[in-house]
Amino acid sequence: ECHIKGVTNKYPFKVEAEQVENCECDFNPDFLRRMYAKLDWKAFKDTAECLKLDGLPESVSEDMLKSDEGFLRTFHHILLEVEVEEGALICPETGRRFPIHKGIPNLLLNEDEC
Amino acid sequence: MGRNERRPEESAPPEIYYNETEARKYTDNSRIIKIQTALTERALELLALPDDGTPKLLLDLGCGSGLSGETLTDNNHIWVGTDISPSMLEVANERDVEGDLCLNDLGQGVPFRMGSFDGAISISAVQWLCNADTKAHDPRKRLRRFFETLYSCLSKGARAVLQIYPKDTNQASMITNAAMRVGFSGGLVVDFPHSTKAKKYFLVLMVGGSAAVPTGKTGDESMYDEEGAEEMQTSVRVNDRKTRKGKKGGKLKGKAWILNKKDQQRYKGLADVRPDSKYTGRKRKDRL
């Protein structure tokens, strides 16, 4: 979320991606279930769609989390394996861009923003 | 060797001190690797994560070139690291660390959503916040911004364990008090308090809950075999934090609590709050 002082509508960042990479990560359904509880699913899905990643359902049921392997694999892939190499995070309220370079977002604020 | 070496914090701000050359030197140094790994393992221990085999989502504050992060990965956790030095992060990238990295100044806030993390660690970083690198920097304000945003991005029951190299007791108090003010409970754990070389400070912070503050380590100091250590401690007396088992069987109100209360009173404008001195919160003899 955006940490510029005074911004109320700070979550989620919009994502602009110029270059996306995939990396491999161990599949762990228990971890995914914990993460699901912390996520704002709509925000997560919208962000994925920013990155042209479809395949996430509108809503997620208990059963899907428990035993739908197809869903879990997609969730796993998007959550942990897709990385934005070049692009930007954009504050939803101010439009301020935080560039991403070599996979690292630059979240440093200017003097007047903190 | 190195008995009176300058602390890095006195040379330059971290993003300048840890330039490309320093970043590589730091990361290639086997002694530093050994120490950082030991510190991270100890921090993980103090984090007291539930041992259920599931990876946890952790935050590594001041992750640098990823030395501490790799230990987190070795312990099967998923982590996000932040650091202010682009050169250090560059080295982390080259070493292909598993964690997600971001370039961030902790004094500006920890930019993550409420309740995201199962825990946070920081190895040898937070004391950098005590320096005012520019005229506009107010260390107290930065410490507060850091702690309040850290507090908010931890989930309920999570802990933050911050290993620090405080310059002196004032700095240790400054950091500890800033944390207590935003609602953390916990305290400073000192390992090997009687050893100049091996003494380590861990600020253990808890969100909610009233678990006892862990005891510091004593005994085998070999994990911190520091021939010519980079950070030499002056011999500073800090209250050894023992487990909070008060004589009355309830919570002991330690020095940090007293300092915090006095600050609150000053803030509220109460007159007659005595200035803090070395006698504040000093242990009194039993018979008083």
Image (cartoon, rainbow, N blue to C red):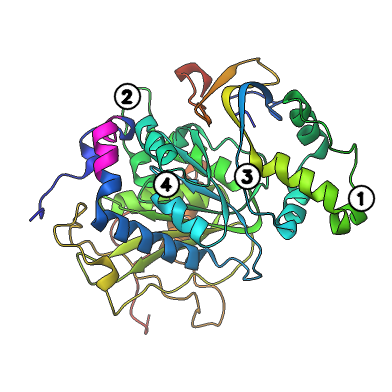
**Residue where numbered disc 2 is placed:** B134
**Residue where numbered disc 4 is placed:** B66
Of the residues shown, which amino acid type is indicated by label 3?
A: Ser
Circle 4 marks a residue in which chain? B
Inspect the magenta stretch and tell me whether residue B253 lies in it. Answer: no
Judged from the image, the secondary structure of the residue bearing numbered disc 3 is helix
Q: Nearer the viewer, mark 1 or mark 2?
A: 1
Instruction: Write the start and end of the magenta stretch as one range.
Output: B16-25
Of the residues shown, which amino acid type is indicated by label 4?
A: Gly
* Disc 4 crowd, CA 10 A, few/some/many (<14, 14-19, 20+): many
Q: Nearer the viewer, residue A109 or B93?
A: B93
Q: Nearer the viewer, residue A39 or A9?
A: A39
Circle 2 marks a residue in which chain? B
Quadrant in which the C terminus of chain B is drawn: bottom left
Is A77 placed left or right of A107 in the picture? right
Above-or-below relation of A94 to B203: above
**Residue where numbered disc 3 is placed:** B152
Q: Nearer the viewer, mark 1 or mark 3?
A: 1
Above-or-below relation of A86 to B129: above
Judged from the image, the secondary structure of the residue bearing numbered disc 4 is loop
**Residue where numbered disc 1 is placed:** A61
Q: Residue at x 28, y 32 (%)?
A: B20
